[in-house]
Amino acid sequence: MIQRLASAYALGLAAASFLAVCSAEAGWPERPIHIIVPFPAGSAADTVSRQIGSRLAEKLGQPVVVDNREGASGAIGTAKLASSEADGYTIGMTTTTPLVTVPLLNKDAGYKVDDFAPIAMIGYSPFVLVIHPSVPAKTIEDYIALAKAKPGSLSYSSDGDASLARLGAELFASMTGIELTQIPYKSSTQAVIDLLAGRIDSQFGILTTTQRYIQNGQLRALGVTTLQRLPEFPDLPTIAESGLPGYEVTLWMAMVAPAQTPQSVVDRLSTEINHIVAQDEVKKALHDQAIVADPRGPDEVRAAIQKDLKKWTDLTSSQTWTAKVPPR
């Protein structure tokens, strides 16, 4: 009899808990939502988050607050998001670097990929291999030949060992059998200043920081890292079509939540954010940040994560990988 009463009591507690969760989900959102951005104010991720946040607030009927938690290649803010309550009131903007490459290369990052629930893909930024005009190369083939003739003589900039600027260069080197010398910087903006001055030779640079210098002739572009050519530079070949089939490096941007966030909340956020990103004015705002709008749902975000995990795991576990563990 006592055992039956205990079982009934346990079932009652479980049912009450379930009903409480369902009730909370049904009423969501009932208070402000915070978007953690692991990059500084004024960055592309910050600008995009504010564009989306203001429109999301209108659709949900609650304020949406952007919370910048920059530092350690995005690891500080991303770790904060991972430890937040999984109730739909704290979500985060992320990119390939803090979500995938940082925890892959730094086991002490404070989080792992499985700590997050994908919500929506926002878009992606292409990279461009650019060189200082003094470097005697006009094409990708010239650049490779120059590097092979003088191993280690060509330098390139990175903004951290876990950055795609570094990984893209290492992937390029591994696929071509060349040796390049990394010059680390704190940001791509600082790196491009030295590139313009000729203090470094090349950069696998994000289009945001290199586009105007390519257009005014201060930098020479050799190839883009996407599988398709860019509308801005229709005559600029892809690296893949320049003798490296399959070479692709893009920095995607997505919205995620702490793992275990209720699926109904994730689905609602995904639907609303995808509708927002599909708006012409938002596409333009993304384009102004050199981001190609690419609204997609949780499954597609998850697939992009797994694709990049495999690519960068294969690279960093190869015998040619010599990168240091990036610090927190």
Image (spheres, rainbow, N blue to C red):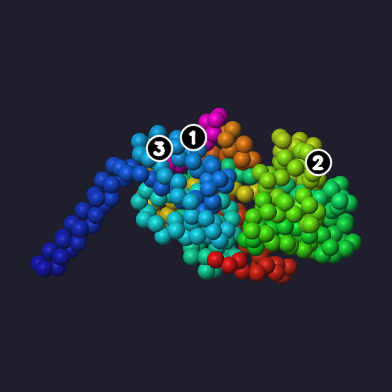
Q: Between disc 3 and disc 1, whose residue precedes?
A: 3
Q: Nearer the viewer, residue 196 or 28?
A: 196
Residue 2 location, x and y as percent?
11, 68
Q: What's the mark number on residue 276?
A: 1
Q: What's the mark number on residue 217?
A: 2
Asked whether the residues under the numbered discs 2 and 1 touch, taking CB atoms below 8 Å apart as contact, a structural biologist would say no
Tell me, yes or no, whether the highlighted magenta stretch contains residue 276: yes
Q: Residue at x 41, y 60 (%)?
A: 83
Kind of residue sitting beneath label 1: Ile
- The part of the image, by quadrant, that contains residue 207 is top right
Q: Residues within 10 Å of mark 3 (few under 14, many from 20)?
A: some
To which residue does mark 3 refer?
Answer: 57
Residue 213 location, x and y as percent?
75, 42
Kind of residue sitting beneath label 2: Gly
Closer mark to the observer between disc 2 and disc 1: 2
Q: What range is drawn magenta here?
A: 269-282
| Left or right relative to 207: residue 328 | left
Q: Between disc 2 and disc 3, whose residue precedes?
A: 3
Closer mark to the observer between disc 3 and disc 1: 3
Secondary element at tag 1: helix
Whole-Å distance between the Cαs marked 2 and 3?
42 Å
Q: Residues within 10 Å of mark 1 (few under 14, many from 20)?
A: many
- Is 187 drawn above or below residue 64 in the view shown? below
Majority SS type along the magenta span: helix
Whole-Å distance between the Cαs marked 3 and 1?
11 Å
Secondary element at tag 3: helix
Q: Between disc 2 and disc 1, whose residue precedes?
A: 2
Asked whether the residues under the numbered discs 3 and 1 touch, taking CB atoms below 8 Å apart as contact, a structural biologist would say no
Q: Residue at x 48, y 63 (%)?
A: 111
| Left or right relative to 149: residue 281 | left
